[in-house]
Image (cartoon, rainbow, N blue to C red):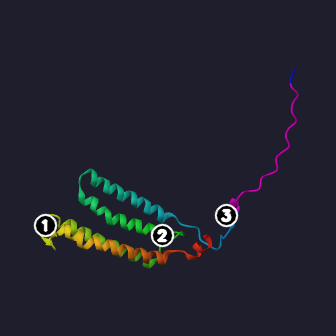
Amino acid sequence: MPRPARPPRPPRPPRPPKGPTMSDLTTRGASDTPEPDHKRAGMLIHAFVAVAAFGLIGMLTDSWQMVFLAVPLFAVVMMLLGSLRSDGSWERVSTMAIAAYCAGLGVLVLWSILTASSDAMLWGLPMSMGVIFYVIWPYTAVGAGLLYALVFDRTIDEKHLATAG
């Protein structure tokens, strides 16, 4: 004997959404805050990959100069990425300070590379090692911390932190 057909189930009532719906997210604060622009972040991520590839090529070809030059390039890319605001903008003074710091670091690295084959001495060390030990090391140890404090102080969103906590 065939089974009798079941009556169709009544439709379930719709479930209330657990969080804000997509329409809530698109309409909430639409006039208050601009849409974040992530083009700069994407550009910096691509620049990071390019610098990593540059350094890797230097490693594979046994060119220590390429590897050493990647250091200030990594510094500028990572500092700019760290100073990027949530809306995709940079604070002008912070960006100029980062550019100046990394330009100084680049000059010091080039000085060290260009004097690698020199017989000159700097306070008892070969010139290239003396530049690294006596100039680049203190420059990065002290300068990077001061630069971090300046950038953090200018780019932190205290209102956002106060509401998040």
- Looking at the rendered structure, the kind of residue marked 3 is Leu
Q: Are marks 1 and 3 in contact (CB under 8 Å)?
A: no
Q: Amino acid at mark 1?
A: Ser
Residues under numbered marks 1 and 2 in contact, where contact means CB atoms less than 8 Å apart:
no
94 sits to left or right of 117: right
Q: Quick check: is 158 in the magenta stretch? A: no
Residue wearing tag 2: 84
Which circle, 1 or 3, is nearer the viewer?
Answer: 1
Residue type at the position of mark 2: Leu
Q: Main secondary structure of the magenta part?
A: loop
Give x and y (percent) for residue 53: 34, 55
Magenta part of the chain: 3-23
Q: Position of residue 61 (x, y in %)?
A: 25, 51
For mark 3, what is the residue?
25
- Say whether disc 1 or disc 3 marks the residue closer to the N-terminus: 3
* x 50%, y 72%: residue: 89
Q: For the N terminus, which image quadrant?
A: top right
